[in-house]
Image: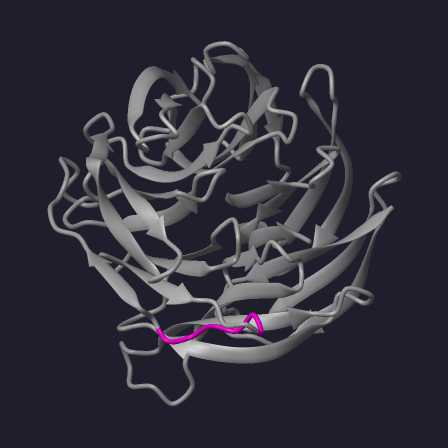
Amino acid sequence: MKTFVYFGTKPVEHSKGIYCYSLDLETGAMALVDTTTAVNCAFLSVHPSKRVLYTLANVAGAEKGQNGGLAAYRINPETGALAHINTVSCPTVSPSHVQVDRIGANVFGANYNSSFVVTYPVRADGGLAEYSDIKRYEGNGPNEKRQEAPHPHSVFTSPDNRFALVSDLGTDTVHVYENDTLNHKLVSTKFGHVNTTPGAGPRHLAFHPCGRFVYVLNEMASTLGVYNYDSATGALSEVQVIDTLPSDYDEIRWAAEVLVSPDGRFVYSSNRGHESIAIFSVDPASGKLTAVGHESTRGVQPRNFNIDPTGRWLIAANMDSDNCELFRIDPVSGNLSHTSSLAIPACARVAFL
C-alpha cells in the first residue's frame, strides 16, 4: 500500500519547486521519486480524480504586480511525475491559497494581499480556463497592522459541494456562497456570513466528515471556532471557541492549519511560534472539542500539515527550518508518534494523492 505525497515550496534559491515522495502506508517509509521545477508553488490542491494537481504560479512575462496565476499539472498515477498542462493568470499578484471543489468543476484562488477571490472553470483535460468570477471585499478589523483591509485567506467547499466558505482574516468574517458549478461562480446566499470574535483573524477551516460541523481556525487569536452547519442553507452557528495553545503559554499567537481526521474522531491544528500540533478529541453528538495535548513539530513555523487519506500518518511542514516531519497517528488516543524527517527547503504545503 503506497501513495504519493507532494510538497510545495516557497520561491527560494535552494528549492527545486515541487517535490514528490512515495509513502508506504504500512511502514511509513518515504522515498524521493520526482521533482518538478516551478516558481511560487507554495500551495497545492489535488483534483478529486487524483489525476491533476493545481498550484500557485507566477505568469512568465507579466508586468510586475500582475504576475499572479495558477497552474495545472497532470499526474502520472504510476510514477507520481507531473506534466504541465497550462498556467492561467490572476488579475494581480499571486493568490495565497488554491482549492479545487469536491467534484472538480471549479478551482478557487484566495488572494490575501489583493482582497479578492477568483473562480476558474476546470476544462475537460483537467487544465484551467481563464477566470470566470471575482469576489472583491471591503472593510477592516480592530488590529490596525494585520486588519487594515480585507484578507481572504482560503476557500473550502462543503461535503456535498453545494456551498463554498471564504475565510477573511482582515474583517473577521466567514462568507458563505452557493458553489455554482454550471456557471462557475460564487453566488451570494440568504445566510450571507458569520463574524468571528473581533481580532481573531479566521484563516482556514475544515468540515467534519459527517457534514454537521465546521471548525474555523483563527490565526491571530490561535483559537478554533466550532460551528453547527446547516447543509440546506449553508448557515453557521457558533457553539464553542477553544484555545489551540497551552494555558501557560503567553508568547506569539500565529495559528496556521486545521484538519479533521478521516474518521472524524480528532481535530488537529498547527501553531507557529509554539511550533506544535494541537490535538483535540471530538464529541460526536455536538462536535465540541476537548484538548488532548500538543506535539512538537521539531522545526520552525509549521505553516501546513496534512493527514493521509487512511488516517494513519500526519506530515508537518516546517517552512523556516527546511524540514518536514512524519508522525504516526494513534487511532485510539489521537496522539502523534514521530517516525522520520525529510529535508525539504521552505516547504509550505503537503498534499497527498
Residue 133 in the image: x percent, y percent? 27, 64
Q: Residue furthest left?
A: 139
Given residues 266 and 13, the one toward you in this image is: 266
Vertical comparison of 67 with 305: above or below? below
The residue that appears at 61% across and 65% down in the rendered structure is 52
The residue that appears at 58% across and 47% down in the rendered structure is 318
Q: Is residue 22 left or right of residue 344?
A: right
Residue 287 in the image: x percent, y percent? 47, 16
- Is 13 contained in the magenta span? no
Vertical comparison of 129 with 278: above or below? below
Residue 175 in the image: x percent, y percent? 26, 41
The residue that appears at 64% across and 38% down in the rendered structure is 298
Choose top left, top right, bottom left or bottom right for residue 190.
Answer: top left
- Is 126 contained in the magenta span? yes
Given residues 70 and 275, the one toward you in this image is: 70
Can see residue 114?
Answer: no
Q: Is residue 85 left or right of residue 91?
A: right
Choose top left, top right, bottom left or bottom right for residue 113.
Answer: bottom left
Q: How many marks?
A: 0
Which coloring applies here?
A: one colour
Q: Is residue 312 left or right of residue 255?
A: right
The residue that appears at 39% across and 30% down in the rendered structure is 231
Magenta region: which residues? 125-130
Vertical comparison of 231 with 349: above or below? above
Residue 118 in the image: x percent, y percent? 31, 62
Q: Main SS type for the magenta part?
A: loop
